[in-house]
Image (cartoon, rainbow, N blue to C red):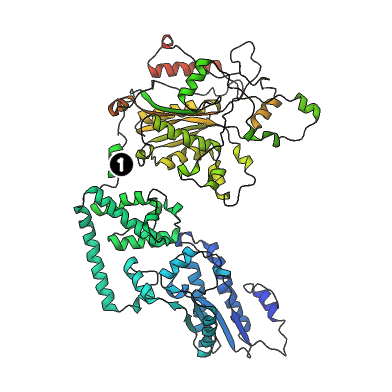
Amino acid sequence: LVACDAADRDALAAALATVPAEHPLTGIVHTAGVLDDGVIPELDAARIDTVLRPKADAAWNLHELTRHHHELAEFVMFSSTAGIFGGPGQGNYAAANVFLDVLAQHRQAQGLPATAVAWGMWEERSGMTAHLGDAEIARMTRAGMQSLPSTLGLALLDAATATGQALLVGTRLDLAAIRKQADTEGTGVLPLLQGLVKAPARKARGAAKAVEASSFAQQLAALPAEQAERALLDLVRTHVAAVLGHASADTIETGKAFRELGFDSLTAVEIRNRLNTATGLRLPSTLVFDYPTPEVLVDHLRSELLGLDADAATAGASVAATADADDPIAIIGMSCRFPGGVRSPQDLWQLLAEGRDAIGGVPLDRQWDLMAPPVSDDERAAAPVLQGGFVQDAGDFDPAFFGISPREAIAMDPQQRLLLETSWETFENAGINPRSLKGTPAGVFVGVNTQDYVTLLAKVPAGGEGYVASGTSGSVASGRISYTFGLEGPAVTVDTACSSSLVALHLAAHALRNGECTMALAGGVNIMATPGTFADFDKQQGLAPDGRCKAFADAADGTGWGEGAGVLLLERLSEARRLGHEVLAVVRGSAVNQDGASNGLTAPNGPSQQRVIRQALANAGLTTADVDVVEAHGT
């Protein structure tokens, strides 16, 4: 046994040089193969080289380095039916095997021994087929490719080398399945085998399908809207179930994304082919990515079949081309989570009315004591007692309610979880079914400042690694809300430190006045997953010893940190009145500025604050005499 990389010409030459003269080389069997499947647009040079190198480079090296070995009687190459029939997602693999097929013919033309056997699928899942799951095997079986028992495969190998033929195919075919695929998917994934179907019968079936497809739209148009939608939904669910190998279409959740149902780029092409044949349409291969759920796909199919405006489903909720810049912004719904057990606006009002103190110790589920670096007894005694305004049970979450897997939920920052919950509750508070807003141009504007949860994810549970980037990204905080509820207006995450939520509100109001969205969620969230903020300010001696801010007081001695989440639902006042929505408050004006090159990067500047207050009053059409309450933050 000599190990070497056969695709490395020098290494292979060195290995062949070890063959003793008294025992000359009499046979070569080349079985190497590597897969790197992907649809054509994803196959870059590197992915093609990965697959061609062990097949083509190694075979060519064997050919050139042994062509003068006169005792060589057999030169057998394991090719694949992917090069004969084609294979979904295997453009690179098909090309690699075609090279072997042609090399066998080239050698025979030169009087050299050569046999290439294009194998189908063998029963044992090992090596290149070890990764195949039941769904992939079912897909290949539906295409007419039956697995080959090893005993039969070995017998065919012996027979192949005895024929003297350069190229043979070793596989089992289900001709009935191939004919069925030709009917359900148009051309089918085994185009060269369509010749096995008698031409007159194939032509007759094709004509029948064309008539059936052309009449499909007419039949659909004759149905009441509700029945037409049901017929299309049944059609989509039936084909989705068939592609995924489900026994019944009833198991297909119509509101779930195709990706979550188990679709990949290959099954996406298969469902497109099936629906093309069933409806007579010419649908794109990106169908299930452009229309990500069965419900959304049904709307698209109905529009295409009946010649409707593509945006007809949401035309009633379209954004106004022009908006009244003087139209005030109404707050029609709200929700929140705050310290002191506050889980609703009513709870917050009660806490304020009673004057309760919501500052307390660190919740036990934070386990911050385990994160602290080792310190001496003296340092521990001198350290301040951590006090803050903490949201209890901030880690509690029901992922299934939002269609999120447990693995993804663990990788999600609790801030994203809280925003989902409070956004849902805000819609409920406004008397609006959140699911009714799917596909509408509603906006999301969220203020997020703290980004420390990612530091706790050094060891992510198996299967959750792919969710960390999206689960801890501030930009995803707003996008996840839009994705979950199907909102198609602007989705913006804002980080302007302590003013983030107010700036989000300001931007949302502008978007509504400018006609960029019909309604908007605006708010913010802050959950401290680690004690990092406390540690940083403690080093600067900036923490209040009792954890309480005493803004504008002589007793002010540092900052105190708190948490919370709050979301408002906004609408132009005229629109809220037209739709009969309860108006909880009105935002008449707002303003944002920066003090530029002032007395320090983080130092407040008095004149700049005066200017922004004057601007907000002017935008609202008010004077200082109209102001009853001022709320501010500070140390």
Secondary element at image label 1: helix
Q: Which residue is mark 1?
A: 314
Against 631, is 48 above or below? below
Residue 199 on image: x %, y %: 29, 78
Residue 409 on image: x %, y %: 53, 43
Against 561, is 451 above or below? below
Can the viewer see residue 517? yes
Residue 349 on image: x %, y %: 48, 20
Q: Which residue is nearer to you in this view: 381 or 310?
A: 381
**Which quadrant: the C terminus?**
top right
Please tell me which residue is depicted at 35% across the width and 42% down the height of the picture: 439
Can the viewer see residue 631? no
Mark 1: few, some, or many residues within 10 Å (few <14, many ≥20)? some
Q: Amino acid at mark 1?
A: Thr
- The picture quadrant where one finds residue 71 is bottom right
**Which quadrant: the N terminus?**
bottom right
Number of numbered callouts drawn: 1
Please tell me which residue is depicted at 49% across the width and 71% down the height of the picture: 95
268 left or right of 56? left
Please tell me which residue is depicted at 27% across the width and 44% down the height of the picture: 312
398 left or right of 224? right
Q: Which residue is nearer to you in this view: 533 or 503?
A: 533
Outermost residue toward the left in this view = 222
Against 128, is 585 above or below? above
529 left or right of 581? right
Please tell me which residue is depicted at 25% across the width and 48% down the height of the picture: 226
604 left or right of 212? right
Residue 68 on image: x %, y %: 62, 87
